[in-house]
Amino acid sequence: MAEFDQELDASGLNCPLPILRAKKTLNSMDAGQLLHVIATDPGSVKDFDAFAKQTGNELLESKEDAGKFHFMIRKA
Amino acid sequence: MDKKLAIIATKGSLDWAYPPFILASTASALGYETQIFFTFYGLQLLKKKLALEVTPLGNPGMPMPMGMDKWFPVLGMALPGMQGLMTSMMKQKMKSKGVASVEELRDLCQEAEVKLIACQMTVDLFDMDPTQFIDGIEYAGAAAFFEFAGESDICLYI
């Protein structure tokens, strides 16, 4: 796993909370910084993809590992 | 310029409280400028103290736990206490699945500057007391809604 600036554990949270928490965390970060999000909601895979496309924040990585979903997002 | 989402919320039950607040808070996170216009029973969603319930009555699509629909067909759903029972079961289910409460989603909407507008006509019609509503809402009518909705990219009636 690459290095990151902030980490958000959204495990156990359901739609739309992982996206809302991620957005809130990104708001407190600087452009170019990396946010690592962990989630258990299977719907979050498509949601983070769509979130990145619509907000311009870049989704560098999206993967499943041991039943959890990991997303690496670079703030625009 | 930001995209715009306009929602009309007309229903005042626990299950129907979710779509407007989920969509509005998510849209805000995606950069939409969002307004929700609450009319008729939708005004229940603006009360400080929410007393929202879900009813199994006239709702054949509602999944019933433990095969209850077999044991209590249609008329059984009208039994006293059934609505309260269904409501507490639904709340428990939501909590265990990590679904946010209506209050939490509403707070997130306000934090994200979603504009919440109460239909003035309904407030007058039902003699509703404005002090029972949360702070930070506006009161307006149909023409004011169209001023925003007419320029919206997405407009939903819920």
Image (cartoon, rainbow, N blue to C red):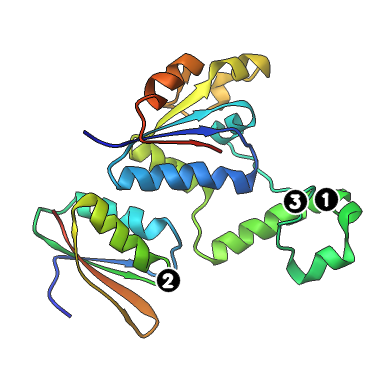
Say the numbered circle drawn on residue A60. none
Q: Nearer the viewer, mark 1 or mark 2?
A: 2
Element under label 1? loop
Amino acid on which the number 2 mark rests in the picture: Pro
Amino acid on which the number 3 mark rests in the picture: Asn
* Cα gap from disc 3 to disc 2, whole angstroms: 28 Å
Residue at mark 2: A42
Q: Residue at x 31, y 62 (%)?
A: A48
- Looking at this rendering, what residue extends furthest in the bottom direction? A66
Horizontal relation, residue B51 to residue A59: left or right: right
Q: Nearer the viewer, mark 1 or mark 3?
A: 3
For mark 3, does the 10 Å Cα neighbourhood hold few (<14), some (14 to 19), or many (20 or more) residues?
A: few
Q: Quadrant of the C terminus of chain B?
A: top right
Say the numbered circle drawn on residue B59. 3
Residue at mark 1: B81
Q: Residue at x 74, y 67 (%)?
A: B65
Task: Report whether residue B141 is seen.
Answer: no
Horizontal relation, residue A58 to residue B16: left or right: left
Element under label 3? loop
Q: Is B45 drawn above or below residue B79 in the view shown?
A: above
Q: Residue at x 39, y 70 (%)?
A: A11
Give x and y (percent) for residue B45.
56, 36
**Residue B44 versus residue B20: which sits nearer the camera?**
B20
Q: Is B131 drawn above or below residue A76 in the view shown?
A: above
Q: Are marks 1 and 3 on the same chain?
A: yes
* Cα gap from disc 1 to disc 3, whole angstroms: 17 Å
